[in-house]
Amino acid sequence: MGMPVSVEIVDATDTKIFKKVFDYFKSVDERFSPFKETSEVSRINNGNICKESLEMKEIFKLAEQTKRESNGYFDIFRKGKMDPSGIVKGWAIYRAAELISELGFQDFFIEAGGDIQTAGKKWKVGIRNPFKVSEIVKVLMVTDCGVATSGTYERGDHIYDPHTGLFPHEIASLTVIGRNILEADRFATAAFAMGRKGIEFIEKLKGFEGYMVDNEGIATMTSGFEKYV
Amino acid sequence: MLGGKKKKRRRGYFYISYNLINEKFKKIALSGIVVLAFVFYAIHEKNEGVTAVSNINTVIDTKQANGTSSNISQAGKFKDGQYISSVADAFFGPLQIKTTISNGNIIAIEFLQYPNDRSTSIEISNASLPVLRSEAIASQNAQVDIVSGATQTSEAFRQALQETLDKANL
């Protein structure tokens, strides 16, 4: 994945749990990084693998489900290669959160590459200005939520629309708040590929809210989004 | 030669004139043939069924008996006990079951391992969309715990990935 990971656990008394979490992310990176020749993703793409791991099978299953639910806008296969990054990040954060919960910790958050899972207490989450990284354009108060933002800092060249073979130019970022980061992330990725229609897709999903910023700096939000502000 | 029509006769064949058979008899004959066919089929199937079950019993005995002789009391029944399958690859994860036989019949099948099903159902509303609220984005002066956004680091990696895929030109 090659991205910074932040973990804050309110009731942690030593650093062991943090090591566990970071080791977990490292193992995910080893398996799923498309930049590592030895990763399972690279080996599959090079045709060098016979039997997928259980984790890869789980990712395939989630990808297939998301593809169906988004009418094909989410697709990990592109030009004959497989890139599951759009789903692995949220999935890994979700799994790491389970790991922390199972050890008895209640108030924490995990943030990786701009995607967040919170637990327990209320946490203040800012939405980054897609045009100015040092700025925040919205402040949210969330409890036990996943917050995922899909977007790009430059026009166009990011998430790929499998239907047209093009990259959508219409919007700069789309933030999705859901019951957990796994759900929020996969729908944020799918919805971003839909361009302006993405926010309508999120509106139709029960239990999810969204905040879309277009290329002109106008934000559109779903009807229940205000409850997080 | 006497007068009248010459009757056709084929040596070796029993020739029946179609017009001489009563319609009623024809129906009875047809029904009889159908019934006979079913009877033969049923007998055949019954024999097959008994043979198959005997084979299963033999297989179970071989696995469970540990060298002792078979003691199946009745033909066509399973041997009482609990049987655990090996772990099978069900594509989305491992699958293993335990079957419980009592009085020769299957009374329970239990999943010891099943594919990890993380599927969460989603509901999509079919109601028409309300008009969604819009606003111009504005910088907020507030301290936050965490920031959500497409980070430059992940963004750079995604673009680099796209570049490599384009170079591969697949």
Image (cartoon, rainbow, N blue to C red):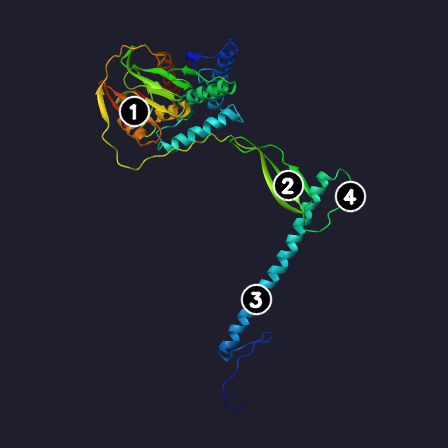
Mark 2 falls within which chain?
Answer: B
Q: Which residue is mark 1?
A: A225
Spatial separation of the CA atoms under disc 3 and disc 1: 72 Å
Spatial separation of the CA atoms under disc 1 and disc 2: 52 Å
Q: Which residue is mark 4?
A: B69
Query: Tag 3, which secondary structure?
Result: helix
Q: Mark 3, mark 1: which one is toward the viewer? A: 1
Q: Residue furthest right?
A: B68
When the figure is inspected, residue B56 is found, relative to residue A92, above or below; the finding is: below
Q: Which mark is residue B35?
A: 3
| Screen quadrant of the N terminus of chain A | top left
Spatial separation of the CA atoms under disc 2 and disc 3: 40 Å
- The foreground one among B12 and B109 is B109
Determine the image quadrant of residue B121: top left
Q: Which residue is mark 2?
A: B100
Residue A127 coordinates in the image, percent (x, y): 31, 16
- The foreground one among A159 and A94 is A94
Mark 3 falls within which chain?
Answer: B
Determine the image quadrant of residue A147: top left
When the figure is inspected, residue A39 is found, relative to residue B37, above or below; the finding is: above
Spatial separation of the CA atoms under disc 2 and disc 4: 21 Å
Residue B74 coordinates in the image, percent (x, y): 71, 51
